[in-house]
Image (cartoon, helix red, strand yellow):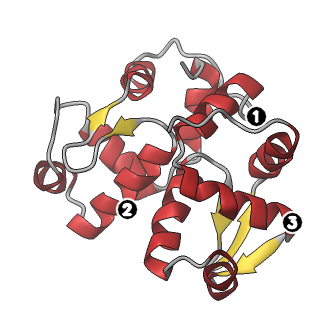
Amino acid sequence: MICNRCLLYLERGLDKKTRTLLYAYRDKEEPSIRALVAHSGLSQYHVREALMTLRGAGLVWGDYFYTLSPNGQRLIELLSTADRPEPSESLCNDCLREIAELLPNDVYPILAELTRKHYRTTQQLVAALNVSSYKLREYAFLLRGAGLIRVDRNRIYRLTGTGRYLGLMLQQQPVAVPA
């Protein structure tokens, strides 16, 4: 389980559209994408992007019917109480490891490439990793949700401080990834 302070840290890093979608879960048990579009007021495109971001943060599970994970449920509860702790300044090691274990295997080469090079463009990552730009974009949403990368307007990918730390941790001791 991700600790409460780290959950609030992850929530603080979400963009406005992703927060809007997260708040739409307060009233829905197991919403479909169509229900989330209707309830959040976001386009289907933005709902899909936000769901990938929330999935990267370990807050939702699923492919078509996205359900809140236990971490997501706890975050919703935390956000609805006035008596909540201050968000942490960064993810603690245990929570960082837990999030890393939830990420699909395909994102680790991106972390490794960005650990070797401090920044890369979309084209450079596509060429270096032999993935489609569509897949790279999907993985970027997962990594952004986990607070590990930033992507600026010019499509330059950079590790955050947390992402750099995880990259170094993975070089020393790889994460146990389920098969």
x 54%, y 45%: residue: 103
Q: Nearer the viewer, mark 2 or mark 3?
A: 3
User: Which mark, residue 116?
Assistant: 3
User: Which mark, residue 49?
Assistant: 2
SS class of the residue under badge 3?
helix
Name the N-terminal-most of marks 3 and 1. Answer: 1
User: Which mark, residue 89?
Assistant: 1
Q: Position of residue 131 (x, y in %)?
A: 54, 76
SS class of the residue under badge 1?
loop
Between 136 and 176, which is closer to the camera in this rendering?
176
Between the residue at mark 1 and the residue at mark 2, the CA separation in whole angstroms equals: 25 Å
Q: Amino acid at mark 3?
A: Arg
Residue 66 lies in what quarter of the image?
A: top left
Q: Position of residue 67 (x, y in %)?
A: 26, 35
Q: Does 120 sit left or right of 56 as displayed?
A: right
**Is 60 drawn above or below residue 104 in the view shown?**
above
**Is 27 drawn above or below residue 13 in the view shown?**
above
Between 63 and 176, which is closer to the camera in this rendering?
176
